[in-house]
Image (cartoon, rainbow, N blue to C red):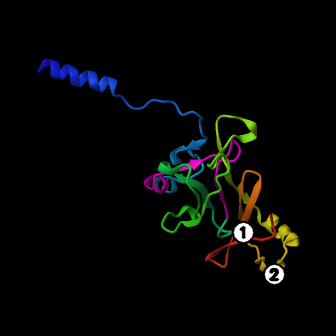
Amino acid sequence: MVITILTVLAGALIAGPDEKPTEIDTLIIEPAESRDLPKSVVTWLEARDYLIPQANEQWKNVISGSFTDVNQTDFAVITVKRSAMDDSCSLWIFPAGDTLTPMLLGPYKVNFYAGTNWWPPYGQKTPLGYAWYIVPISQEWIVSLKQYATDQSEFPDVSHQGIYLSIVDKGVGWQYYYDGYKWLRLNGAD
């Protein structure tokens, strides 16, 4: 009996969790670590096992602005699933922080660096930053883009901010919420 107890205890000490360090650290945070998200959005993201990848110290992939209506503050966040960090990412928009009707843009995947969306920013080997990032775009900036559009008729009347979605240094698109129900990618604005 004593030998059995000692064997079980010794086995528990030897068979601890895998503590092998990650070869290359990634810039990624839990939703609760973001100081820029309302608690309701944090709870929604945690319930779905999402993480927030960071492009670098400047591009946090959590932004706020008037993306769907000039009279409210919306939140946008790029997410990856905890179990699939090298899979596609999604851009979620939470109008007025509402988690009952979030909007999904994506998924997006490029396999930018060695078959993954992670890359060494500015030539660094560690930590890896996420290739995708988002930036809020002012209403005035979107209006000024119209002159560069190949088809100016596709530009809507601009009444609020938009979102610039990019991968590393390659613009993917200027996203603009239009007509109360759809997102437009403003062609010719990159």
Magenta residue check for 175: no
Q: Return the x and y of residue 66 as percentages of the image width and height.
A: 67, 64
**Residue 2 vs residue 113: left or right?**
left
Q: Count numbered badges in the picture.
A: 2
Q: Residue at 47% of width from left, 57% of height from top? A: 44
Q: Residue at 72% of width from left, 41% of height from top? A: 121
In space, the residues marked 2 and 1 are separated at their CA atoms by 18 Å
Q: Secondary structure at mark 1?
A: loop
Q: Residue 153, located in which quarter of the rendered image? A: bottom right
Q: Return the x and y of residue 48 as percentages of the image width and height.
A: 45, 56
Magenta residue check for 58: yes
Amino acid type, mark 2: Ser
Could one spot residue 161 in this view of the protein? no
Which residue is situated farthest in the left direction here?
A: 1
- Which residue position is annotated with label 2? 153
Which region shows up in magenta? 44-66
Q: Quadrant of the N terminus?
A: top left
- Which residue position is annotated with label 1? 160
Q: Eyeballing the image, is 7 above or below 145?
A: above
Q: Eyeballing the image, is 46 above or below 173?
A: above
Q: Residue 165, located in which quarter of the rendered image? A: bottom right
Structural crowding at the residue carrying mark 1, measured as other residues with C-alpha within 10 Å and reported as few (<14), some (14–19) or many (≥20): many
Amino acid type, mark 1: His
Q: Eyeballing the image, is 58 above or below 107?
A: above
**Residue 37 vs residue 135: left or right?**
left
Q: Secondary structure at mark 2?
A: helix
| First in sequence: mark 2 vs mark 1 | 2
Q: Return the x and y of residue 168 as percentages of the image width and height.
A: 73, 50
